[in-house]
Amino acid sequence: MNSRKLKMALCRFLACVVLGFFALSLSGDVSGSQSTCCNQCLQRFNNCDAPFHVCCQIYNACIQQCGGACSPKNCILD
């Protein structure tokens, strides 16, 4: 292997390491943002002045934007 090929291989390896590290750090941010999203929807639900079933439907619509990380509410009162 000549020097140029060795440098190219090293650069590719380092690029892969950097991309892998970046992907791992992003995955942590996504789960944190999902939790924040759920909390914001829950806060809106708790502060909602409309009837329960309306607030519940708004909450369930809100959590659809959170990537499936939140628990839906049962909007039907028994």
Image (cartoon, rainbow, N blue to C red):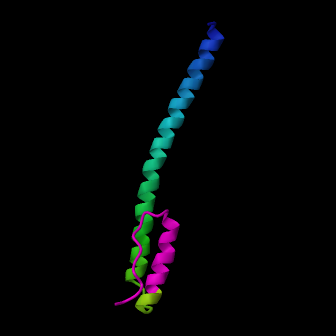
- For residue 57: magenta? yes
Residue 63 vertical placement versus 18 (above, below) = below
Residue 77 image position (x, y, % from top left)? 37, 89
Q: Residue at x 40, y 78 (%)?
A: 73
Residue 37 vertical placement versus 75 (above, below) = above
Residue 46 image position (x, y, % from top left)? 37, 81
In the foreground, 14 or 68: 68
Q: Residue at x 44, y 85 (%)?
A: 55
Determine whether, in the image, residue 77 is placed left or right of residue 67.
Answer: left
Residue 37 image position (x, y, % from top left)? 45, 66
**To which quarter of the image does residue 43 belong?**
bottom left
The C terminus - image quarter: bottom left
Name the outermost residue toward the front: 78
The N terminus - image quarter: top right
Q: Residue at x 43, y 93 (%)?
A: 51
In the foreground, 75 or 18: 75
**To which quarter of the image does residue 52 belong?**
bottom left
In the foreground, 77 or 61: 77
Task: Identify the magenta region.
Answer: 55-78
Residue 47 vertical placement versus 72 (above, below) = below
Name the outermost residue toward the bottom: 51
Name the outermost residue toward the top: 2
- For residue 8: magenta? no
Residue 21 vertical placement versus 64 (above, below) = above
Determine whether, in the image, residue 23 is placed left or right of residue 6.
Answer: left
Q: How many marks?
A: 0
Q: Residue at x 65, y 12 (%)?
A: 4
